[in-house]
Amino acid sequence: MFVKYLVVFTGMLLGLTSVQTTAEQLNSSNLMVQHAKIREFLPAAASTAAYFSLMNHSEQTRILTKATISNIGRVEIHEHIHNDGMMRMQKRNELTISPHQTISFQPGGYHLMAFEPHKALTRGERLTLTLYFANGEQLESPITVVSLQEEMTKQGDSHSEHKHH
Ligand SMILES: [Cu+2]
């Protein structure tokens, strides 16, 4: 009796796992998120920033329309623009990604702005980033909570990696 139950249960687990793997493979074949991180909120700060790389490996243009992060009440897509010699942030309602383009969300460029955390973020904690596209597609990725210092160190590393650009 118990063995029978165990076999059925294991079968269910295997079934779930294979479905999940298929979904990941489908996503990685066309849209991909890498290096997703969110800065912890500084004391008394109303917002913080999140960064990642978004790759479109498909032949179709995709339009990013929305992003959400678990435990965060509100997320906006932002860009930095130069205006009269001043750098300022501007909200984007959508962002177009051409076939085979990679968009880096990084300090001074595109970024996600996170507001209204449901609870305090802990350094090293992994949340879930979900990106929504105009064609109805959704892409999920783990996103790691980092300190401002860690984030700047990693930024320095990735900068030197891309010196050849
Ligand atoms: Cu911003």
Image: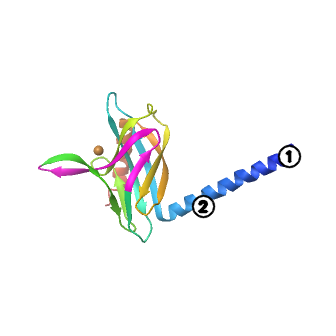
Check disc 2 and give the amino acid type: Thr
Ligand 1 placement by image quarter? top left
Q: Is residue 138 left or right of residue 75?
A: right
Q: Secondary structure at mark 1?
A: helix
Q: Is residue 32 left or right of residue 91?
A: right
Q: Give how far apart the Cα atoms at labels 1 and 2 are.
A: 29 Å
N-terminal of the pair, mark 1 or mark 2, is: 1
Q: What is the x, y in percent for residue 137?
A: 47, 60
Q: What is the x, y in percent for residue 159?
A: 33, 51
Q: Which secondary structure type mostly characterizes the magenta part of the structure? A: strand
Q: Is residue 66 above or below residue 39?
A: below
Magenta span includes 70 = yes
- For mark 2, what is the residue? 22
- Magenta segment range? 65-84
Crowd class of label 2 (few under 14; some 14 to 19; many from 20; radius 10 Å)? few
Name the residue: 27% across, 48% down.
108
Name the residue: 42% across, 47% down.
68
- For mark 1, what is the residue? 3
Which quadrant of the figure contains the C terminus? bottom left
Q: Secondary structure at mark 2?
A: helix
Identity of the residue furthest to the right in this view: 1
Name the residue: 85% across, 43% down.
2
**Which quadrant would residue 54 be assigned to in this image?**
bottom left
Which quadrant of the figure contains the N terminus? top right
Q: Is residue 108 above or below residue 42?
A: below
Q: What is the x, y in percent for residue 53?
A: 40, 54
Check disc 1 and give the amino acid type: Val
Name the residue: 44% across, 68% down.
58
